[in-house]
């Protein structure tokens, strides 16, 4: 199993910045991708940004030019730097990882998607 723990959320004024962090721990053979989703009450969870093991990234249009995802593979950590925050960025942000917990020679090899518990980001004056 892989556990994900997010940190860095909080209250920030419009135009401010926050940096979210997410650390993966537990039984990890390989992490293929890590990313961030967000959700507001009454709406579906939506992709914010993702970073793949090869280094490629993809962003939702809402965050392009303002958000930057980065990853420290050695630390199994993914970051989301959010600048020029807007009230509409208010949401619970979830970390996600596509990972293989056990190697094939130990009966594993399947990729699963894991989720963190979420961290609240509130943008308000």
Image (tube, helix red, strand yellow):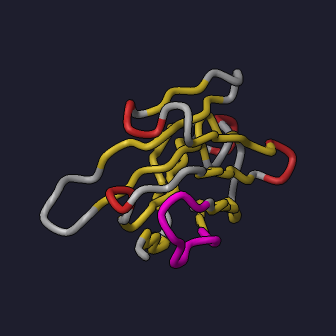
Range drawn in magenta: 6-16
Residue at 46% across, 39% down? 63
Q: Residue furthest right?
A: 74
Residue at 53% across, 72% down? 12
Q: For residue 45: magenta?
A: no
In the image, taking residue 52 as reference, residue 55 lies left or right, namely right
Q: Nearer the viewer, residue 71 or 111?
A: 71
Q: Is residue 43 above or below residue 97?
A: below
Q: Nearer the viewer, residue 32 or 82?
A: 82
Residue 3: x and y in percent read 59, 66
Residue at 54% across, 44% down? 35
Residue 72: x and y in percent read 80, 45
Residue 30: x and y in percent read 69, 40
Q: Residue furthest left?
A: 42
Can you say which quadrant of the picture contains the N terminus? bottom right
Residue 8: x and y in percent read 64, 71
């Amino acid at each position: 199993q892989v556990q994900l723990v997010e940190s860095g959320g909080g209250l920030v004024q419009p135009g401010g910045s926050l940096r979210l962090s997410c650390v993966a721990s537990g039984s990890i053979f390989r992490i293929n991708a890590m990313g961030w989703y967000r959700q507001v009450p009454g709406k579906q969870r939506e992709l914010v940004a993702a970073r793949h093991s090869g280094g490629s990234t993809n962003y939702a249009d809402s965050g392009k030019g303002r958000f930057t995802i980065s990853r420290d593979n050695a630390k199994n950590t993914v970051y989301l730097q959010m600048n020029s925050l807007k009230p509409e960025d208010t949401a619970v942000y979830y970390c996600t990882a596509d990972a293989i917990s056990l190697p094939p020679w130990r009966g594993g090899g399947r990729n699963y998607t894991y989720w963190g518990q979420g961290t609240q980001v509130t943008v308000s004056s």
